[in-house]
Structure formats: structure tokens, C-alpha cells
Image: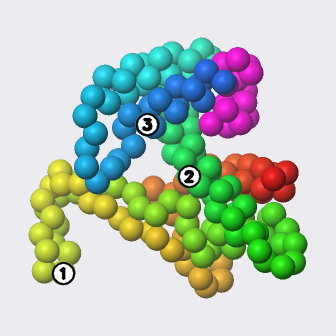
Amino acid sequence: AEVLALSLGFAPAAAERAATLTSALCDAVSPTLRPRTGTGSAGDAAAGALAGVMADGLGSGEAARIAAAISVLFQARDATAALIGTAVLAGRGAGTAVPAAQRVDEVLRHDAPVQCTRRTAVQDTAVGAASVSAGAPVWIFVATAERGAGRPATFGSGPHGCPGAAQATAIARQVVAVL
């Protein structure tokens, strides 16, 4: 999150603050199978403070731009860390040195760092014999990415595609190379 904030043009102290607040927000509101108690107010406080840091760092009070920047940091924090960790582990005991970029690419194709995501049904929907009511949470499991040619499905596509795919991949490759 800090590296991404820096790439958005934040001063180092503001980028560090944005990363700290992003962590607090992620810890408070990341989806879990069983809802956590007592995290709502912590998440609200972190989101409010992060919105202020973003407005200052972006030089804009435009709500949509601030929300987009917060979303990028929020979505990138755990996913990029998981990509880095999985790629580092993928190189253990390989017998031969596999370049960092290749390890990251293999993880993206074979062992998606984000195993599932949650969406909300916007209308009553039938999925096979099951009925999903409008407003119901829907878990989407992306436990493994595509194994075929082309861009891995790991980053999604269309309106739910990851806007930071290139940045996450570049950060992961550099960190894995150093580690």
C-alpha cells in the first residue's frame, strides 16, 4: 500500500500514513465467513482518516477519485502480499534458480493469491436449482487461475477487473527478486 501511495505521488510520510490506515481498514472490514464484532467503528474511523489523507495527497476533494484510490490500496494490500509470499515459497526446494518474474507469473496462473471474493446480488437470480435473492452476499471462489494461454484470470476482467494488475505484478517481481 505504501509503494502504491508513493506511485500516486504521495510524499513519503503521507504514503506511510495511508498504508497504516489501509491496514486498519483492511483488518476491520475484510470479508470473513463469520462476521467479526467490534470492528465497524474501527473501520469507519480508518476510512474517514484515510479519505482525508487521500484528499490531501491527491490534491483533490473529488469523492469518486478518493474512493478509487482507497479501493486500489485496500484491494492491493493483502493480495500483493499473498502474491509475494506464494512466489517466494514457490522457489523453495526447486533445485534450480527460477527467476523471480517467472515465479510470479507461475503463481498468477496456477495458485491465485486471492482465493475468493464477495459480491452482492443486484437482483433475484437463479443459479442452477438455487435461488439467490437480491441483496444476498455471493462468494465467488477463484481458487485457481486459468492454466491456458493468455492473460491469467487472477486479476479478473471487465468492470470487476483489477486496475492495479500491472503495479501488483511489478511490485511482486521486485520484492521476490530481492528476497
Tell whether 100 sits left or right of 29: right
Quadrant housing residue 45: top left
What residue is shown at x 56% (from left), y 18% (from top)?
53
Q: Nearer the viewer, mark 2 or mark 3?
A: 3
Question: At numbered mark 3, what does the secondary structure look like: helix, strand or loop?
Answer: helix
Residue 83 lies, in percent from the top left, at 63, 58
Q: Is residue 146 magenta?
A: no
Q: Is residue 139 above or below residue 98?
A: above
In the picture of the structure, the residue carrying the numbered disc 2 is 79
Q: Is residue 166 or residue 2 the one in the foreground?
A: 2
- Tell me where residue 105 appears, x and y as whole percent: 71, 69
Q: Which residues are magenta?
A: 1-15
Tell me, for residue 128, which label it has, or none: 1
- Amino acid type, label 1: Gly
Decide: few, some or many residues near mark 1? Use Cα within 10 Å; few <14, some 14-19, many ≥20: few
The residue at which mark 3 appears reads as: 27
